Structure formats: structure tokens, C-alpha cells
Image: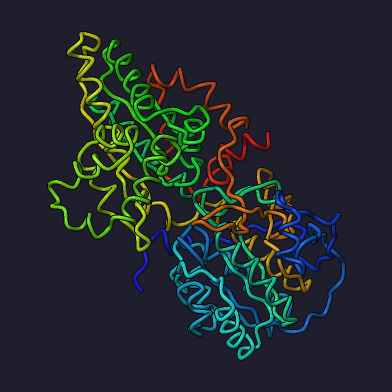
Amino acid sequence: MAKSALQIERAKYRPKLPDVIKGDVEVLKDVPTESIAEREEIKKLFPKTSGKSVVIFRRRDGKTEHPAVNAGVILSGGQAPGGHNVIAGLFDGIKRLNPGSRLYGFRMGPKGLVEHEYVELTAEIIDEYRNTGGFDVIGSGRTKLEKVDQFEKGREILDLLGIKSLVIIGGDDSNTNACILAEYYAEKNYDIRVIGCPKTIDGDLKNGMIETSFGFDTACKVYSEVIGNIQRDCNSARKYWHFIKLMGRSASHIALECALQVQPNICLISEEIEAKGLTLDEVVTSVASVVARRAEDGNNFGTVLIPEGLIEFIPAFRDLIRELNDFLSADDAEFKMIKKSEQVSYVTAKLSASNSKLYASLPDTVARQLTLDRDPHGNVQVSLIETEKLLAEMVAAKLSEWKSEGRYGGEFAAQTHFFGYEGRCAAPSNYDADYCYSLGYTASCLIGAGLTGYMSSVRNTTATADKWIAGGVPFTMMMNIEHRNGVDKPVIRKALVDLNGKPFGAFAANRDSWALNTEYVYPGPIQYFGPPSVCDRPTKTLLLEKS
């Protein structure tokens, strides 16, 4: 396999570990925990795994003899930089427990467990993937582990391979499935333990014990580099407004972190828009107002950062989507008989007055996306809506209206971008390379301690790696009950942007200045070699939260 010069050099990097897990460890347990909400319901659903204590590891002198262990690993959900280092840390960790230990990877996500598709991960394979991006060592998938027949099919192959511990690397949904699986195997008295690792570039799997999900650091640095490049071009040509959509359907962490890094003219935060109950027109007006005020100073250019899930946080738009889903599901056959050229007017006539007015105000391309692009359940695929184009078009229309009224005298031309997949499989930053390796190694310590129902936890990561705190947090401690697809389900709660938190506070304190002035920052590419202040720094989000 051909390799770039960077790949060759990057393979030599040796990730740093917390001092506390570099040798033998002992387990320190805190008081029993409870779920963050619906405590009685969670206890009833997870009687075997509820109430566990938070675990912290402390280094212990001497050498403990551990039997060889067979472990399995699954990459679940979307890719995130550093996944390969989690597996490398897990592999090195179980080999430290006992050189005779073996690691099996299940191919293409949880499906591999159910369909018995696996590969033994040897040192030769692992060494090829250290410090690399992607999940291609075994692939990933989005199969949900929710049914008894899946659990039992999984047990068959785990028993056949002698696997006693299964590590599931994923986001909140994947780790919710890991929690359900851990409870099932414990309830059946199967000798199989389940451990999780926190992954998602969206940054919405975090809490007091999980400082950040892996991949968030790298993805934000990749996006910020490209946004910085665009801002430099923007400031050079001085003739375009760039509307840039960023990953983050459920939360705006990526948009906020990138804003803190690059200082754009505008960054929309979905959680703030929802909290204020803003309409789509109010959002468009707020953006157009900044464009108009900059034009007064002769600055007919700028940048706007947009979270992927923005429109789902606008209350009126959420009502429109809900009514569209109900309508399209009930009248699907009739709708399919309508000519495509007449479908928008047909839908407009069928909706309630308020939703009809909103739907009619949308650009034709977006209106069609809301009715034509549906998932297998008949629901609108909101993630496919080109929100950046929607806002650019609506801002242009608003400015044209103002120009005819003599309220705007500038020139407006827009460029649109969506940065998503570009950040998911980047080579991990030093922070993610170290953090991920530590998460995997910590998972091996949880295995060595014979624990189940825990997520690997590495904290204090704004300090140097030797001072990081390693341990485990019970899945059930992070659970609550949510209404999804018409059913109440136990799930690990997503962490939204805290509007009272320091990161948002720092953004809010500066955004008015960034809006009118051109105060762009150009972060440049991820640096792997050089001063720690450049190479090893964590996200601004973490630095602000821990300051």
C-alpha cells in the first residue's frame, strides 16, 4: 500500500498515556450513582446495571497476574478521527494484562456481531492503523442492537470465540445499545461484559465524567482550517458572503467551537434560536441586518456559520415538519398521483394556515426537498435540506426588498458550502491521538477489573497527558427517558450547547464586534510536530469549560 510522507512520519508517533494506567492499577469506587432523570423507571429497566459506582484507577506497585482474555470490539455509527487509536490502546492494554490475550474485531459495525463476521486483530494489522483516520480497519455500521434475537446471535459467536468482554465504540445511541446489551447479558447470567467508548464529532456525548467525545477536536480543527482559508479569500476578494453549514444536527457544538477559533461575522446557534422562539423570518432578518450594516462601511463580504440541524430548532419549522410527516404518511397514495410541477401548490393548500404560509415562503428547491426526500418511514429527511442555500436565498430576497425601499444600498453575492464528511476521517490531532489511545487503554483496565455496564472515561484533559484521570462511568448514570418515534425509550441524553456555559458566554461577548468588524483568525492546518502550545492544545470549548 502506497503511503504519503505524512503517513510514514505519523506512524512513528507514540501516543501519551495518563501516568495512573501505565502500570498495574487498583480500582477506587465512589458512591452508588443514579440516572440523570426518570430514576425509578431506569432502575426498573436496568436492575442489574443500575446503581453502579463511578470508577477511578490508581497506579499500584507490583505486578498482578492476569489470565489471558479474549475481547471483541465494534465500531458503531459515523466515523470520527481517532477510532483506530482506541482499538490500538485496547489491544496494547489487554496484551499488557497478559501477552496471550486476543482481540477480535466485528466487521461493519454491530451487524458483524449479529451475522458473525469478524477478524482477529493482530499486531501486524494494528500497527498499520496507528494514528490514522477512518474506521477502515474493520468498518462501521448503524445496525441497532435492540432485539433479543440479536443479543442471542451475538452470544453465539462470543461464546464460540471465547470472548468475555465486548467493547462498543460509538455515540449516544450506540452506547445506549451497549447499555441494553450489558443489562441483558447480566440478567441472563452470561459471562460476557460490555464496555463503551464515547465517539462522535458532533460533541454531544459529554457530561461531568465524559469531558468530550473523541473526534470532536480533530473535526473542528479541520473545519476551522478550511473556514479560515475561506475567510482569507473573503477578505481578499471582498465581494462574497459565504454561508457555511457544519455538521451537528442535534447540537451546535461544532459551529460554536469553529466560531471561537475563526471569529466569523455570524454564527447561528440552534439552541439559542430555540430558546428565544425565533421564526425563520426573524433569523433571516438578523443575518440580513448584519449584511446591511457591514455594507454601510463598504464591506460587502462576510461569513456565516450554520449548524446542520438549525431548522429543526425553529419552533414554527418544527411544527411544519411534524404536519408534513403526518400529511405525507396519511395521503401518500394521493400525493404520488399529483404532477411534480403541481406538488408544491397541492401541499400548500393542504396545510394549516400558519404552516401553509411558512411553506409558501420557502424557495422552491427547499419546498420540494421537504416533500420529495423522505426516509423509509415516510418522514422528511431534514438532514438533506440545504439550509445554507435556504438562508442565502432568503437573505438575498430580504435585501432586495430593503433595496427597493431604500433601506439597503450594498451589493450582495453569496457562496454556499457544507463541511461534513471532510472532517470525519481526518488523521487525528495530537489531542485525539492521545485521548483515543487512552480511552482504549482505559477500556482494557475496565476489562481487567471484570466490570460491565461502563463507559471508558478519561478526564482532566486540559492538563498534560500524564496528569489525566482514567476510569469508568456507568451507562445508566447518563440515561433518561425520551419520546422517540411515538415510543418512550431509555437513552443516553445528548448534551446541547449550554447557553449559560463559558464557551457560549465567550462567543456571545464577542460576536457583536466580530459581526461589524473583520476580525478573522486563520488557524491553519493541524500541526503534529512542534511546540506543545500549537500541537497539543485541546479545543477552546474545553479550555473555557475547565478554566
Q: Quadrant of the C terminus?
A: top right
Tell me where residue 425 sits by quadrant: bottom left
Judging depth in this view, the residue of 221 and 276 nearest the camera is 276
Front one among 244 and 397: 397
User: Does residue 459 lie above or below 61 as drawn?
Assistant: above
Q: 33 or 80, which lies in front?
A: 33
- The residue under the point 71% across, 59% down is 476
Looking at the rendered structure, the number of numbered marks drawn on it comes to 0
Residue at 55% x, 48% y is 204
The quarter in which the N terminus is drawn is: bottom left
Determine the residue positioned at 68% across, 61% down.
456
Question: How far across and down, in percent of the image, does residue 35 sit?
Answer: 73, 53
Report the colour scheme: rainbow
Tell me if residue 302 can be seen.
Answer: yes
530 left or right of 89 in image: left
- Residue 526 visible somewhere in the drawing: no
490 with respect to 32 (left or right): left
Is residue 501 placed above or below 122 in the rendered structure?
A: above
Q: Farthest residue in the top direction?
A: 406
Q: Position of residue 469 (x, y in %)?
A: 74, 53
Residue at the bottom extreme of this rendering: 160
Taking the image as shown, residue 485 lies to the left or right of residue 473, namely left
- Decide: is 342 above or below 172: above
Nearer the observer, 266 or 103: 266
Q: Residue 36, image x and y in percent?
A: 71, 49
Which percent across, then down, holds residue 467? 74, 50
